[in-house]
Amino acid sequence: MDWFTGIIVFLLTWWVVIFCVLPFGLKRDETGKPEKAHMGRVILITTGISGVLWLGIFGLIEADILSFREMAQQSAQKDQMPPTL
């Protein structure tokens, strides 16, 4: 994985994780609005979890356990239609 792909994978992972982390520890008032969002804490937790997940994804890709190119080639081979006579 080159550096650009690594950054893109990290950013995608980060955005998925932030939506999972946002509701935890959130206290609401009687109208349903959050009292204190603690966004700094949420961002730090999100970055930590995303970093660990990114390391796992990086390890899978570098060990050739997960190969998107190979999956695309297999999918393309399955999609090829046999010639008609």
Image (cartoon, rainbow, N blue to C red):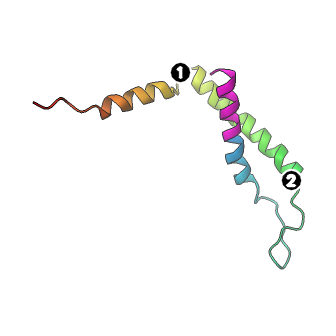
- Amino acid type indicated by mark 1: Asp
Q: Residue at x 58, y 25 (%)?
A: 61
From the viewer's side, name the closer residue of 59 and 72.
72
Q: Residue furthest bottom?
A: 30
Please identify the quadrant where the C terminus is shown.
top left
- According to the picture, the residue beneath numbered tag 2 turns out to be 39
Mark 2 vs 1, N-terminal side: 2
Q: Is residue 18 left or right of residue 58?
A: right
Q: In the rendered image of this protein, does residue 65 appear above or below residue 48?
A: above
At horizontal 44% and vertical 29% (from top left) the residue drawn is 71
User: Which quarter of the image is occupied by the N terminus?
Assistant: top right
Question: Is 4 part of what is drawn in magenta?
Answer: yes
In percent of width and height, residue 38 lies at 88, 56
Dot in front, 2 or 1: 2
How far across and how far down the image is residue 4, in percent?
Answer: 68, 25
How far apart, in angstroms, are the residues tagged by discs 2 and 1?
Answer: 37 Å
**In the rendered image, which residue does mark 1 sit on?**
64
Binning the other alpha carbons within 10 Å of mark 1 as few (below 14), some (14 to 19) or many (20 upward) gives: few
Region in magenta: 1-12
- The reply to whether the magenta stretch includes residue 78 is no
| Helix, strand or loop under label 1 | loop
Label 2: element kind: helix
Measured as percent of width and height from the top left, residue 7 is found at 70, 30
Label 2 CA crowd tier, 10 Å (few <14, some 14–19, many 20+): few
Relative placement, left or right, of 10 versus 79 is right
Q: Are marks 2 and 1 in contact (CB under 8 Å)?
A: no
Task: Answer with the quarter of the image where residue 55 lies.
Answer: top right
